[in-house]
Image (cartoon, helix red, strand yellow):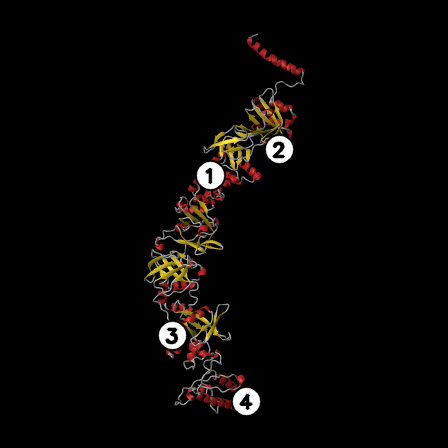
Amino acid sequence: MNIQSIICTFWLLPILGLVQAFQQNPKDDFPFSTVIDILSENVEFSTFLRVIQKTGHVQYLNELQNFTLFAPVNSAFAKDDRITQQFEEHFHIENFLMHNRVLEVKELKNGTYLEKRAAKAPLLLKKYERHCFVNDIAIVDPDLQPSFQNASVQGINNILLIPPKINELLVQLNKETQDLNVFNDFLTSFSNYNAYTNLSTILIPLDVNFRESFNTIEINYLTDKYKKMGKSNAISQDKWIADRTSLIQELVIDEVHGGILPNELILKNKNNRHLLIKSNTEGTALSVNESDFSCISNKIFEIGIAHGFSDLDFLRTHIHFDAEKYLHGLNCSEFVKELYFRDLEKFIQNDKKTTIFVPQASFNEDRGYTKPSLLYHFVEDRIDLEEEFSLLRQNQYVTTQIYDSAFCSSAKRLGGHCQKFKITRSNKGYYINGRFKILNTKPYEIGNTYIYSIDDDLQLPGDLVLSLPPQDHCSISLMLLKDLDLLDLPSNHKGYTILLPCMNSWSNNDLTIDYLRSNETALNFLMKNLIFEDLIYSNNYSISTTVKNLYGNSVSIEIEEVMGSQNLTKISVSNINESIFVEENSDVFFNQGVVHPINQLNLPVGLEISLKELIETTGTKEIFEFFNLFHDLSSIIRNKEEYSILVPTASSIPLSGITVNSTDLRIFLELHLIPANQTQNLLDCNGVINTKSGKQLACRKDYLNNVFISIEDDDWGKEVRILKRGCTSSSNRSCVFLIDKPISLSWLDSEKYHLHLPGIAVGFGMIIGVTLAISLLFCIIITRGGKVKHNSDERRVEQATTPLIQSSPIIRNPSYSATAHVSPLSQPSFEGSYSGNATQRPRDIRKLGSEQSGNRSVSHS
């Protein structure tokens, strides 16, 4: 026997002895058992063992040493056969193994322990008194150890599932806490977040932590809420990616850390920031840099662990915000893109004082901005609306302010001056140029930049017509400028200032308008004297300058604040006698300058509109014949005295019976003359209006604002209507009022006013009356058929007796024979029936009595 046989015999004898002993007592345990033996000997693991056998992992487990196997008992599969099927399909033995550690539950102290596992998610062990859990699954059959392997089997009452991915974990945790919305949006907006979270510890800021570190606009930017950053320009994208990368690297620590930690563990995040990590005594919560302990702790995900905090103080350490990033956060990425396209990005990147008025998101898509229109959205200063408009001035709150925009390069139109805009405050909010509403009265502030959102795209002032607001009622002035071809002014490299009559400027000047439109020279002189070749604003107080008007004259202009007024500014022009008052900051900007809408018609020196010219404009030329009969009255027409005059329409004169031969023509004219100091009462239709005749007139307006005049204390049925007005100057002392018909003398009180006729006229009237009566009787008797005709003649005779001053039509100069009827068409004139030697000129008659008081004789003059 050789030595090798002897050695083998020595090795085999113990084994043979053990086999023999086992054969003698087969009921005793086999002294050499493995993990597989434990699973097969315990029927509660039969399902799990069958899966191991089916998937071919028996040999692999038999060869392992120094490990722990977590084996689900049969009850974990008993709920549904599909669970077993799915378990088999996705089974991987490594998910149930813990290498390099033989777990003995009985040796564990109470607490939470994190067990790292190479390329697999860590396992979290929790021990409380005699109960132990792995990933929150109870260990129901602990510490089963084979004799032939350094291992243990821990029976668990549920399947040890693969932990969720980090985004799935966040969704699950957010459903439970409702406090992880921001970080969830932030992380899942990364297309490659796994590159940062693989085998790592994630420090999750809760929503409250995010909102303490960032405002809503900054969060919108970081999370790309509006999904615009991927479409923005390359520079903006690079900045955004860098900011997000910096933030996520602040929150990620390489390797997994959780449960009970060594005291004062110092780790580095991916930004190389040193972090002091501590756990509480039981490992159920962590703190970072002396923060409060985590609200969410030890949450396992597919390749790491997560902890949630409410007070991490280093979130924005490496992120610098500027106006550009804020605009992205306000969903104005298209606006930013346009700024880059026009090389204006400096306005949103520097730290100079700047205010931006940006359209809300729905209005900045594909707007096609020009460089000037973009610049008009910026002010190179900070504007705090609430602060500036709260200032008291002369006991009045400021309601309008004027500012310079950043558009200052219009040398051709504005001479290099900055185009201005104004902000007005009303009970509806703040408006730019009266059109664009500012949506946030408190600005978004970042550095030295203020940002306001407006409801529409802020547009540069357009041409003159489009810039004037309709409520200013400037249409008449615009019509006159159009007549002169002055709506588009020639470029002068200085800009223009226009004093434009608007509002009520033309309300008492209908005739003046007619006159100006019929006299282009006068119109040209007026309008060009109201246009100046320079920029003059209402808030340029105490300014005194000399400029040229469009007529070519040099004039001096002074701007003064009216003390004690409600924000009025006085503009004094050297060639306009009256001062012009405008509301402070009421300026209207257009593409060539500024307009000051004024509420009065101011005539320049050198433009004289006389009463005579205004009367000629009415077309009632007969009135000149009437006034020329009286030298003292005709001087009024020649502007020797200040009066206003009521001029009837030309068509109403013949119908009224007024002629140069009328007895009371002077009284008639004086009844239509208004002293200068009474003119304003008539213009205002207010109070009693005295006339030169001494009679008083009353005025009223109807619901359509038509103006009517009547004799004071008379029936309103006897009235005339004012059709048009026009004044010789802005003082409104000498005006012409065109009325639809004359004021009739017959409306005067008969007891206070009657005709004084000579005696010969009375006698002749009696003769005429007898002759008419006899003729009428003779006609009735002669023929029955003439009855109708005679009745008609009688009516005509009665009409012939109507006085000349009555306003109804009359038949002039009827003459009848004492013995026979003569047709009125063949009658001689009334004057012709008198002798040529008569000492007094014959005049028409007037019937003074009424038919109800009987046939009373009338006297004739």
Q: Which numbered circle lies on residue 777?
A: none
Badge 2: residue crowd in 10 Å (few <14, some 14–19, many ≥20):
some
What is the spatial separation of the Cα atoms under label 2 and label 4, in whole angstroms?
A: 132 Å
The residue identified by callout 2 is 83
Q: Where, quadrant-wise, is the N terminus in this rendering?
A: top right
Amino acid on which disc 2 is placed? Ile
- Given the image, on which type of amino acid does mark 4 rest? Arg
Left/right of residue 201 with respect to residue 736 in the rendered view: right
- The numbered mark, 4 or 1, whose residue comes first in the sequence reads 1
Q: Secondary structure at mark 4?
A: loop
Q: Is residue 199 visible?
A: no
Image x and y of residue 741, in percent: 46, 75
Residue 292 in the image: state x and y as whole percent. Answer: 52, 35
Q: Which residue is mark 1?
A: 316
Q: Whole-percent x and y of residue 325?
A: 45, 43
Label 4 CA crowd tier, 10 Å (few <14, some 14–19, many 20+): few
Q: Which residue is mark 3?
A: 636
Residue hosting label 4: 784
The answer to whether residue 774 is above or below residue 321 is below
Q: Quadrant of residue 149?
A: top right
Mark 3 and mark 4 lie on one chain; the one further toward the N terminus is 3
What amino acid type should be assigned to the residue bearing mark 3? Ile
Between residues 418 and 573, which one lies in front from this camera angle? 573
Q: Secondary structure at mark 2?
A: helix
